[in-house]
C-alpha cells in the first residue's frame, strides 16, 4: 500500500462490479485498514461495499482520490479467498469485481449482530412468593442469563410474571451474545459401525485430514454403498482438528434427509447455504462463518464463496452433477473450483459419486486423484436387476406411453405393498401443443422453443425465459375449438396415464416447478420415504441421492431422451442419470428391478447399464474422448454472442472469428447459430474454441477479444471455459 509525504495512504479496493482491477482510494487519518478489510467506498453517485485488495494503490496524488467512507466491523476476507477470486477471474476470463461480488452476498452481515437483551438474577427477592415466581427463580438461580420470553416459556408462566419480578429488582438487564445459527457438531456423538470397505476408505481420507496438505480423493461407490458415512469420518476428523468444513451438494434445498443424517451422526445440523434461505438467516450464517462459530456448512455451489476463517476440508457430493456449473455472469464449475480452493488453502478435498465424471476418473487413473472404491451396497443389499424393454417389440397402447411390460411390473409391485418410481426427465404435461386443423404450434414469442403445457396449472410455459400464457380453448391461428392436441409426454401426462391404470393407487408427482416450491417438495420426499404413497412420477430431482426404503421398482419412461442431441457429454450424462435413478430401488435390501423403455437397446449406454459393467462404459467413453481430443484430453471454450437483432449478433460473432490469432494447437469452429437461437428476445451465435490439453486457452481468448470489436449497442459476449451446455 502506498504512503505519501503527508501520511495519506492509498489502498486498492475491489468493488462488486465488472471492474478489471481494484480502484484506488485514500485512507483518512486515524482509519485502520488491512488487506481483506471490508469497506464502504464511493462509486460514482452511490456508495458500495468493497474488499481492500493486495498490492499497492495507484501511484497518483492522494488528493485526487476519493476517501474510504467506512471500515466495517467485520473479520477481514482471508488471503486464501482473495487468491481464489483472482484465480477464478483469470481462469474464467471474468472481471475480478464480479467474482468478488459473490463473496459480498450478505451486506447486512458486515456489521456485528446486535446482542440480545437478557435478564440475570440479582440478590433481591420478591416481596411475595407465588408458585409461578418460585418456578422462575428456580430456573434463574443457575446463574445463566435468560431472554424475557425464553425464561417465561421455560418456567411455564406469563410475561407479566417476569415483568413484575424485574420491576422489583429481582432481575437486572444484561447483554446476551447472539445465538449461534446451529449447535457445534460433536464428532464423537454417534460413531458408526462401518463395513470393511467403508473402514478402509475412511481411514485413507481421515489420514489426509490429519496429515494436512492438499490432496484429492475420489470416493467412487455404487448407489447405497454408504459414501456419506465414509466422508462423515473425514468431517469428524476435521472438526476434532478445529477446522471448518464445507460440504457441497447439488440440490441443498431438496436434501432435508441429508441434514437429518448429519444430525444423527453429529448431534447437530450443519448450517445451510442456498438460494431459498431467508435473507436474515443468510446474513447470520455468513457472519458466523466469518467469525468461525459455524464449523460445518452444507450448501449449494455459491457456498464456495463464504468467508471461512479456518477451512480445512471440502466435500463435493454427487461431484458429477451438472448443477455445479454456473452459467450466469461468472461461468464456473464449483467442483473444479473446490479443488483449486483446496490447493490454495493446502487442505484435502473429497469428491463423492456413484457415477464419477469422466474428468475425475481420468484424473484418478493418471494419479492426480486417489480413487477409493466401494463396490457393494451397505449391509450386503443387492443392486437392482436392470432390464431393457425394447419399445419396438413391446409398444404402449394407442395414446399411451407406458409399455405393457412396465405396467405389469408396477401392478405387481404395488400389489406387494411396495413402491414404484416412474422417471421421465421432462416437466409439465406435454412438450408441444398444436392444432390438428391448421397445424399451428405454440411457440414462445421470445425464444426458439415450444411452449410446454402444464395442465395442472392450465398454462403454456417457456422453460427458458419463463414466459407463460393460459392454455386457450380455441386455436389462435384458425379459431377451431377443441382441436388442440398435446404431443409427447411430460410427468403430468404420465401421471394421468398411471391414474387411469391404477385408480386406487396413491400417486405423487415430483417436479421442481409444481406449486408449493421447496417446502412442498420436502414434505413429499418425506412422505415417500415413509411409504405414504404407492407410485412416484418424477423428473431428475428424484435421482439426487434420496433414500426411499420401500421402493423396489424404477421404470424409466424414455431412456433415449438424453441421447437425442449433439452434446459431446450426452452418453456420459445419460449413463449417470439412468444409473442414479435406477439406484433408488432396493436400498433397504429387498429384491428390486429397474426397467428402461428404449428404442435403442443395443446402444452402448443401455448395454452398460443393463450389464452393470460401468468399467467397460468408462473405458469406451475415455478412449473416445482421447481419440477426439475432447476434455479432459483437450480443452474447450464457448463464446456466446447475443444481441437484440440477429444480424447484429451474427456480424459481431464473425468479426470475433476473424480476430482470432493464428495458433497451431487451437482451432475456432463457427460462428453458428446456437441450438437455442433465440432466448428472452436475444438472438444467439456460438463460437467453439477447441485446443490441445497444454494449450493456453485463456491467452488465446484474451487476444481474440482484444483484437475483435468491442461489444456495442445490444451486443453481449459471454465466455464459457470448459462448457457443460452446448445449447
Image: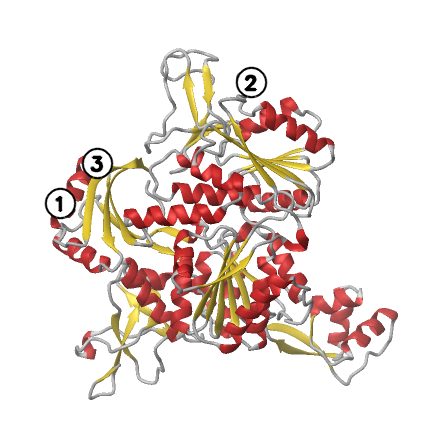
Disc nearer the start of the sequence (3/1): 3
Separation of marks 3 and 1 at Cα, in angstroms: 16 Å
Where is 398 relative to 412, above or below?
A: above
Where is 12 relative to 159, above or below?
A: below
Separation of marks 2 and 3 at Cα, in angstroms: 46 Å
Q: What is the tally of numbered marks visible in this picture?
A: 3
Tell me the element at label 3: loop
The numbered dot on residue 274 is none
Q: Which residue is the site of mark 3?
A: 645
Query: How far across and how far down the image is residue 44, in percent?
Result: 26, 63
Its colouring scheme is secondary structure
- In the picture, measured across the screen, residue 570 lies left or right of residue 54, that is right
Q: Which residue is the site of mark 2?
A: 397
Query: How far across and how far down the image is residue 416, in percent?
Result: 74, 34
- In the picture, measured across the screen, residue 136 lies left or right of residue 591, that is right
- In the picture, measured across the screen, residue 220 lies left or right of residue 723, that is right
Separation of marks 2 and 1 at Cα, in angstroms: 54 Å
User: Which residue is located at x 15 percent, y 40 percent?
Assistant: 651
Let me know if residue 719 appears in the view. no
- Asked if disc 2 and disc 3 are in contact, CB closer than 8 Å, the reply is no
Tell me the element at label 1: helix
- Asked if disc 3 and disc 1 are in contact, CB closer than 8 Å, the reply is no
Q: Nearer the viewer, residue 224 or 601?
A: 601
Q: Image quadrant for the N terminus?
A: bottom left
Disc nearer the start of the sequence (2/1): 2
Let me know if residue 377 appears in the view. yes
Q: Nearer the viewer, residue 342 or 311?
A: 342
Q: Which residue is the site of mark 1?
A: 655
Query: How far across and how far down the image is residue 539, in percent?
Result: 52, 38
Query: How far across and how far down the image is residue 279, in percent?
Result: 50, 57
User: Which residue is located at x 33 percent, y 40 percent?
Assistant: 727
Amino acid at each position: 500500500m502506498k504512503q505519501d509525504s503527508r501520511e495519506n495512504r492509498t489502498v486498492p479496493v475491489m468493488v462488486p462490479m465488472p471492474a478489471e482491477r481494484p480502484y484506488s482510494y485514500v485512507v483518512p487519518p486515524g482509519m485502520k485498514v488491512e488487506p481483506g478489510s471490508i469497506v464502504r467506498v464511493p462509486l460514482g453517485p452511490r456508495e458500495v461495499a468493497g474488499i481492500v485488495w493486495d498490492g499497492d494503490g495507484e501511484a497518483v496524488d492522494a488528493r485526487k482520490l476519493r476517501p474510504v467512507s467506512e471500515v466495517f466491523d467485520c473479520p477481514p476476507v482471508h488471503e486464501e479467498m482473495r487468491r481464489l477470486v483472482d484465480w477464478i477471474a483469470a481462469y474464467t476470463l471474468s472481471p475480478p469485481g464480479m467474482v468478488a461480488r459473490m463473496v459480498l452476498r450478505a451486506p447486512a452481515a458486515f456489521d456485528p449482530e446486535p446482542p440480545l437483551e437478557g435478564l440475570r438474577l440479582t440478590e433481591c427477592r420478591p416481596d411475595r412468593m407465588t408458585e409461578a415466581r418460585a418456578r422462575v427463580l428456580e430456573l434463574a438461580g443457575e446463574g445463566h442469563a435468560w431472554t424475557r420470553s425464553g425464561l417465561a416459556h421455560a418456567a411455564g408462566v406469563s410475561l407479566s410474571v417476569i415483568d413484575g419480578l424485574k420491576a422489583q429488582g429481582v432481575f437486572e438487564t444484561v447483554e446476551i451474545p447472539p445465538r449461534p445459527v446451529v449447535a457445534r457438531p460433536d464428532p464423537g456423538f454417534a460413531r458408526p459401525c462401518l463395513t470393511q470397505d467403508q473402514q478402509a476408505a475412511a481411514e485413507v481420507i481421515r489420514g489426509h485430514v490429519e496429515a494436512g496438505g492438499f490432496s484429492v480423493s475420489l470416493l467412487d461407490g455404487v448407489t447405497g454403498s454408504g459414501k456419506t458415512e465414509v466422508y462423515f469420518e473425514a468431517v469428524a476428523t476435521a472438526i476434532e482438528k478445529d477446522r471448518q468444513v464445507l460440504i457441497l451438494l447439488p440440490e441443498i434445498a431438496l436434501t432435508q434427509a441429508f441434514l437429518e443424517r448429519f444430525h444423527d451422526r453429529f448431534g447437530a445440523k450443519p448450517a445451510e447455504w442456498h438460494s431459498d434461505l431467508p435473507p436474515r438467516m443468510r446474513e447470520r450464517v455468513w457472519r458466523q462463518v466469518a467469525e468461525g462459530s459455524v464449523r460445518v456448512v452444507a450448501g449449494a455451489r455459491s457456498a464456495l464463496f463464504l468467508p471461512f476463517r479456518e477451512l480445512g476440508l471440502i466435500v463435493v457430493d454427487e461431484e458429477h452433477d451438472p448443477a455445479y456449473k454456473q452459467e450466469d455472469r461468472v461461468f464456473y464449475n464449483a467442483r473444479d473450483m473446490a479443488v483449486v480452493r483446496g490447493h490454495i488453502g493446502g487442505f484435502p478435498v473429497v469428491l463423492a459419486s456413484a457415477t464419477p465424471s469422466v474428468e475425475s476418473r481420468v484424473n484418478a487413473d493418471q494419479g492426480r486423484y486417489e480413487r477409493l472404491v466401494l463396490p457393494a451396497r451397505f449391509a450386503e443389499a443387492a443392486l437392482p436387476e436392470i432390464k431393457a424393454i425394447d419399445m419396438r417389440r413391446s409398444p404402449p397402447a394407442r395414446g399411451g406411453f407406458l409399455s405393457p411390460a412396465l405396467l405389469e411390473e408396477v401392478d405387481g409391485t404395488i400389489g406387494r405393498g411396495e413402491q414404484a418410481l416412474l422417471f421421465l426427465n421432462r416437466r409439465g404435461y406435454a412438450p408441444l401443443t398444436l392444432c390438428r386443423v391448421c397445424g399451428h404450434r405454440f411457440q414462445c414469442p421470445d425464444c426458439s422453443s415450444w411452449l410446454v403445457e402444464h395442465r395442472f396449472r392450465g398454462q403454456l410455459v417457456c422453460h427458458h425465459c419463463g414466459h407463460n400464457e393460459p392454455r386457450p380453448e380455441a386455436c389462435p391461428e384458425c379459431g377451431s375449438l377443441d382441436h388442440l392436441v398435446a404431443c409427447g409426454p411430460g410427468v403430468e401426462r404420465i401421471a394421468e396415464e398411471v391414474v387411469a391404470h391404477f385408480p386406487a393407487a396413491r400417486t405423487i408427482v415430483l417436479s421442481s416447478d409444481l406449486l408449493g416450491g421447496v417446502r412442498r417438495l420436502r414434505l413429499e420426499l418425506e412422505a415417500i420415504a415413509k411409504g405414504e404413497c404407492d407410485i412416484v412420477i418424477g423428473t431428475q430431482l428424484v435421482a439426487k441421492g434420496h433414500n426411499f426404503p420401500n421402493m423396489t421398482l424404477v421404470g424409466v419412461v424414455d431412456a433415449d431422451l438424453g441421447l437425442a442431441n449433439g452434446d459431446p457429454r450426452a452418453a456420459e450424462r445419460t449413463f449417470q442419470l439412468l444409473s442414479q435413478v435406477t439406484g433408488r430401488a432396493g436400498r433397504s435390501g429387498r429384491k428390486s428391478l429397474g426397467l428402461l423403455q428404449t428404442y435403442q437397446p443395443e446402444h452402448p449406454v443401455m448395454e452398460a447399464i443393463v450389464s452393470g459393467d460401468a468399467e467397460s462404459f468408462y473405458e469406451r467413453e475415455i478412449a473416445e474422448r482421447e481419440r477426439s481430443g475432447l476434455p479432459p484430453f483437450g480443452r474447450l471454450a464457448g463464446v456466446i454472442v447475443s444481441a437484440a437483432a440477429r444480424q447484429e449478433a451474427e456480424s459481431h460473432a464473425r468479426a470475433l472469428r476473424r480476430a482470432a490469432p493464428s495458433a497451431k494447437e487451437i482451432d475456432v469452429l463457427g460462428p453458428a447459430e446456437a441450438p437455442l437461437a433465440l432466448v428472452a428476445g436475444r438472438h444467439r451465435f456460438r463460437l467453439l474454441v477447441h485446443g490441445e490439453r497444454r494449450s493456453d486457452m485463456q491467452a488465446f481468448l484474451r487476444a481474440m477479444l482484444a483484437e475483435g470489436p468491442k461489444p456495442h449497442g445490444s451486443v453481449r459476449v459471454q465466455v464459457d471455459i470448459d462448457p457443460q451446455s452446448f445449447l
